[in-house]
Each structure stands twice: as C-alpha cells, then as structure tokens.
Amino acid sequence: MSGLLATVQRELRAYFFSPLAYVILTFFLLVNGYIFVLIVSVLNDPRAGGDTTPLKLFFGDTFFFWLVLLFATPVLTMRLLAEERRSGTIESLMTAPVTEAQVVLGKYFAAFLFYLFLWLPTLAYVVIIARNSTVDWGPIAAGYLGVAGIGAVFMAAGVFGSSFTKNQIVAAVVTFGILMLLFASTFMDSLTTSEFWKGVFGYMNLLQHMDDFSKGIVDSRRLVYYLSTVALFLFLTARALELKKWR
Amino acid sequence: MSAERSESQRSLIEGSTLSGIAVMAIVLFGMVNYLSFRHYARWDWTSSKLYTLSEKSQAVLAGLDRDIEGIIFLSPASELYAPADELLSRYEAASPKYFKKRVIDPAKNLLEARRLVEQHDVQRSNVIVIAAGDERRVIDEFDLAEYDYSGAQFGQGPSLKEFKGEQMITSAILELVEAKKPKILFTTGHGEGSIDSPGDPRSLSQAKDLLGRDNFELEEWDSAGKIEVPADTDLVVIAGPTTNFFEPELEVISRYLDHGGRVLVLLDPVIEGTEISDAGLSQWLRRFGVAVGNDLVIDPETQLPFFGPETVYSASYGVHPIVEDLEQTGTRVLMAVSRSVGKADDAPGEYEIEELVTTSSSAWGETDLANLEDLRPDEGETEGTISLGVAVSYKVGVASEADGEEGESDLSDGSENPDEAPDDMGPGQEEESDESESDGNVPEARLVVFGDLDFAANSQLANAANGALLLNTFNWLVQREQLISIEGKKPEATSLSLSSSELSTIYLLVLIVMPGLAVFTGVWVFLRRRR
C-alpha cells in the first residue's frame, strides 16, 4: 500500500508541477465556461420557460464535451509510462519494492485524480445557478457520476496506450485511437441492423450513457461497464509491463 | 548459444502465458458485461421521479404473466423517438422477464420493418406497437403527445407540450392482459349526464375517454322497465339524475347490489325553486346506511379566488383506499355545488361505511335557498366538518337476509316478474353464491355515493385531482385496487432572472477569471521550475 501511495503522490506532484497540465486546465475551463454561458443565456430567457435539467447541456450534450475528453486524455496520460521507458527509469521502478500492479494503479489513480481536479472548478457553475434559482440535485450528481465514470475509462485507456512505446507522441496517438474505437460504438448501433450487434453497441454507446446520467438516470450496466473496462485496461497494462520486464 | 536459445524459449513461454492470461481477461470482461446486460437496475435520481414509471404502470407490469413486446416504429429524427425509447427502456427494466423493447427504423431496416408491418397489420409508420402473441395494440404518434399550436398564427410549427406515452402504453398493456374489460353501465332516462356529449358541461364524455384508457367499457342503459341489470355488468353508475327513479328500477338495482354488484351514485343537488330534490334516491340510499342531505355545502375556509364558497377545494379525506394516495400526497379535489353525503346515524352494522372527502370544520349545509345572498349557518342546519362522499361495502347475503321480508313486499308493489327476481344476479355471482357457504369466500357488494356530479363531468374533471379521484373510485368499485394511484407531479423547471450586470459578472467570472487563474498558476509553476 505504501508503494501505491508513494507512486500516486509522485505522479500527482508531477502533474501539478507540469505547465502542460495548466494549458489543458485553461482550455478545459474556456470550453466549459462557454457552454455554461450558453446555459445561462437560455435559462435567463423568459420565453424559454425554464428547464428541468438545466445542466444537461453541460454533461455530454455538446460536441465540446467529447472534444475535450478525446484530446485532453491522451495528452494527460501520454507520459505516464512512455516517459519512464524513454528515460530508463522504468528499470529502477520495476526493481524497486513495488509490484507492477502498484505502479500501474498508482499512475492511474494520479491521472484520474487530476482529471477530477479539472472538473472541480465547474462546481462553481452549479453554485451560481443554485444561488439564483432552484435546482434538482439528483441529475447534477448523476451527471458528475457519468463524467467520473467515462473519465475513469478514458484514463485507463490512456495508461494502457502509454505502456506500448517510449515515445510520448506515439503513446498519445495510440490512446486517441483506442478512445475513438470506444467512441465509435456511439454511431455503430445505428448503422447495424443485427439485433445482436445493436445490443452490443447500444450497451457501449457513451453518448447514450451521458444522456441518461445528465437526466438523472443511473443505470447499473453503465457502472459495471466502466469498472470492468478500467479493470481490463489496467490488468493488460500490468501484464504488458511484466512482459517487458522479462525481455 | 544454448543460453540464448533457452532465453528466447523462456521469453516465448512467458509471452504465451501472458497472452493467454490476457485472452482470459478479455473473455471474463465479456462474461461480466453480458451478465450485467441481462440483469441490471436503473435508479431515478430526479426529485420528482420523472423517469420512474407510475405505481399503476408498475402494478400492471408486476401482474404480467405473458410476453409483451413494445416495438418502436419511429424514425430517430422524430422528436418522440428519444422519449419513447427511454420510456420503453423503463418498462423493460421494470419487467425484464416479460417485457421486451425493439426499435425498428422504418427507413433503415426495410426488410424487418416490412415483416413486422405484415405481422402486426400496421398501416402506417411512426407508431408504437404493443404486442402479446397474436394480439396487438397500435399507438399512433399523435396519441403519444399533446402539442401546442399557439405559435401557428406566427408561422411556427406545433411544439411538444406533454409526452403521454406512459398512459397510452400502460392502457394498451392492460387491454392485452385483461381477459375482460370491466363493463360499466350509465343509467339514462332521468336527466343524467350523458357520456357522449362533448360540448355539455354536465356530460361525462371526458370521463369516458379517461376511463377508456384504463380499459373500461362504458355503455348507456335505460333502466326503466328492466327486470334485471344485464349479466356481466361490473358497475352501474347513476350520474346526476334530475328526475325520480321508479321504485321497480331501484329494486332492480338493489337486487343487483345484494348479489355482489357495484354501484356509483353521483347525486348533484337538484335545485327546484327554493327546494333541493334528490331524484327519489335519498330514502333508497338510507337502506345502505347513507344519509343524503337536501342541502348545499358551503365551506368558506376552502374557498378559491374567483369562486364562491359553494365550491369546496378540499384536501381532507377519510381512511379508504380510494383516497389514500390523495391523502398522502396532500392533493386537493374540487367539488362545486355539492350536497352532504355521510354515514346515517342508524346505519346497519353489517355495512362498512367510510367517508371519502370532507370539508373543513367551518362548513355547513345550507338549506335556505330563498336567502342565498345572506350566506351564514342558520339554526337547524348541519355545521362543522361535512362529508361529501362515502364508500359502502357489505357481504352478499347479509342484506338479503336482513331485508328478506322488506324485499318481498317491494316486489309485490312493482316488480313485473317476481318469479324471476331471484335469478337477477350480480356480476359472476351464480357460482360464487353457491360456493360462498362452502369456501367462506363471501362476495362483497360495493357502493360509492358522492354529493356532486361536476367533479366527474366535463366542467370540472380536468381540475385539481378530480380525475384521479374518479379513476380511483372506479378501480376500487371493480376491485382493481392495484391500479389505484395518482398521476405523477410535473417537475419544477429551473429558470433565471438575472439583470444584465449580474450576467456580465457571471460571464467575466467563467470566461476570464477562472481560466485566467489557471494561466497564472501555470506561469508561476513554469517560472518556479526554471529557478
């Protein structure tokens, strides 16, 4: 456990002392701030009649939400294992009294925590609306749960992508490719006519997931999908590290 | 050389082992998600439970014992597609064993669409089909929603006002699974409110639509000259009579009740000059322990703005399944111009009589119609909490034995075929009355009396919780208690009323200050690293 905590602390420090992370944070706040401005404009228009789920637009209903996730994730995770391999520190890390699992989990949790940190300032948007109107907290909590769940999957995919290569750019491209495959299910279920594949792609349809979460619907299938996908990616990453250790 | 070979062999073995483990992990991943796909739970975190099926729908689904398929034949471009898809997902989650959802895009799945069109005899696209075996119900997209056409004068198209899918789909399922529609007869010939006159405020045509969605079958029945209530009648309704019933008619209805029948009486106060008449029903209802007042109930405490004190807007209920939901949710009903209807002081003990809706404690029953300008309780008038409706139930055979002699004398007065009278049975009672002594399962007669017609008529049905009260009354009378429920509340919408300066402050905060802080922190970190 101490090895895991030490890895998490080390990686978090690396994040918070990396200028690149603040570039991503700035971009993230600009995009989400713009979406929030749109929401406020609509809610403030007496002709619009109000909205029962005012932050639905904020949680996955716009292209910007997915754009940020798809591009920020590879950038945030590309250095996690690739940099260690490039600089040669991976060998000392593997021989240190930490297991591959602790290394992988430590780096993953640090990345995921930083991802959650990116979303933290958006709570100010919720406070602004709550102070000026009534809000239903259920859909908001569910929306953030969906954001955390999808983020957890994307970060795990990023850690996995980073384990393939020493080159951070290649790691970012691999991660982006994996995320696009995950995201492709969104369109695949409307393209196929097979009931079986409709079921499979519908199950993985991230747009549908966020649509449900943003309305306040929490479905156990989504949560199981996220947890199992994270577990699979991290397991495969640990196995990949183990394989490289023996080469 | 041998060391290199053993090294490469070891790598190969390690690699194969790890690959095998990876494959097993992927298979396990697939299995876990397959199980999750088949067995899952959905939670609705909205405060008004927007995405939860009503208790009625849940009760209908809980009673399913056959496979039902809900097929969406809607284009994804239709604005009803998303709510319909989400709604049927709820049905599927609530009854995964029996209810299956299918989505057919008429444009993309041509072969599948054609096959289903032939199978279910669907004449048009943009429908939802609810199918159970060979039977089906087709719900048109125009029945799924209410539209707002007020923008038409400005060249705007209709806007979606309310999605009514759940009502239509649950009704369709109910029609498919219920072996028989409860048959309701509305008496005619005494000035009752008709079930077929949409423009008449006293008409119950809107009630007919409402009850039709709950799978009730409504017919009018001229009770004059009839010697028995038609067989397989589940409920007789006397809706606002203005002229008297003949004694033989009341005897026929009494026999029907006494053999396990069900009757609903909506007894509006009939004002004739300065008197209030009761269509000759007051004495008849007394037999069942119901006291009908020839009065107008006045309740100043529950008076609504722009309405007189004769309109009671009540949230006071008795203890009874019909009003249990209304009591729990604090929902009100609106009864305009009603008479008092309560439990008689000399009510026989065999009758279980419960008050349904009552007034506040400041009410009274006005009998002096000559001086309505000076509304205040006069001496002799009933004051305090007044009952506006009661529900009566009693075991079949109790009333027959208790009133045996009285029944014979009534028959000798007016019945056309006294020899046939004993054959007049209530719904499905022939076998039950024979069996009642052997298995102790004694059928029960049910009677509900309200001192108002308007709450059920076109004039007031859509107001307050009047529709819910009427539906609950019908479902209790025909013993479909599992369908007694109340419609969900509308969710509260969030809206803002910010001034332009407040808006500017918000925009400044989210677009400049917050990103600016991130930039500042990033620059600070960069400078620290350089040092």
Image: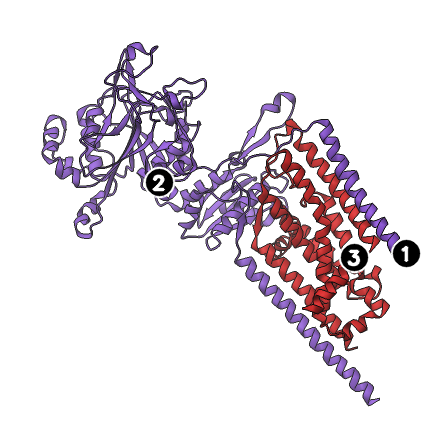
Chain colours: A red, B purple
**Residue at point 83%, 46% (across, down):** B520
SS state under label 3: helix
Inspect the image, locate mark 3, and give the three-letter code of the amino acid beneath it: Tyr
> In the image, residue A185 lies at what x, y percent?
67, 54
**Residue at point 58%, 56% (across, down):** A221
Nearer the observer: mark 3 or 2; the answer is 3
> In the image, residue B471 lies at what x, y percent?
38, 35
Few, some or many residues within 10 Å of mark 1 (<14, 14–19, 20+): few
Residue at image mark 3: A15
- Relative to B173, is A185 above or below? below
Residue at image mark 1: B531
SS state under label 1: loop
- The first of marks 1 and 2 along the sequence is 2
Numbered disc total: 3
Q: Quadrant of the N terminus of chain B?
A: bottom right
Q: Are marks 3 and 2 in contact (CB under 8 Å)?
A: no
Inspect the image, locate mark 2, and give the three-letter code of the amino acid beneath it: Lys
Mark 3–mark 2 distance (CA, rounded to whole Å): 68 Å
Nearer the observer: mark 1 or 2; the answer is 1
Asked if residue B450 can be seen in this view, the reply is yes
Residue at image mark 2: B181
> In the image, residue A123 lies at what x, y percent?
68, 44
Q: Are marks 3 and 1 on the same chain?
A: no
Corner quadrant of residue B425: top left
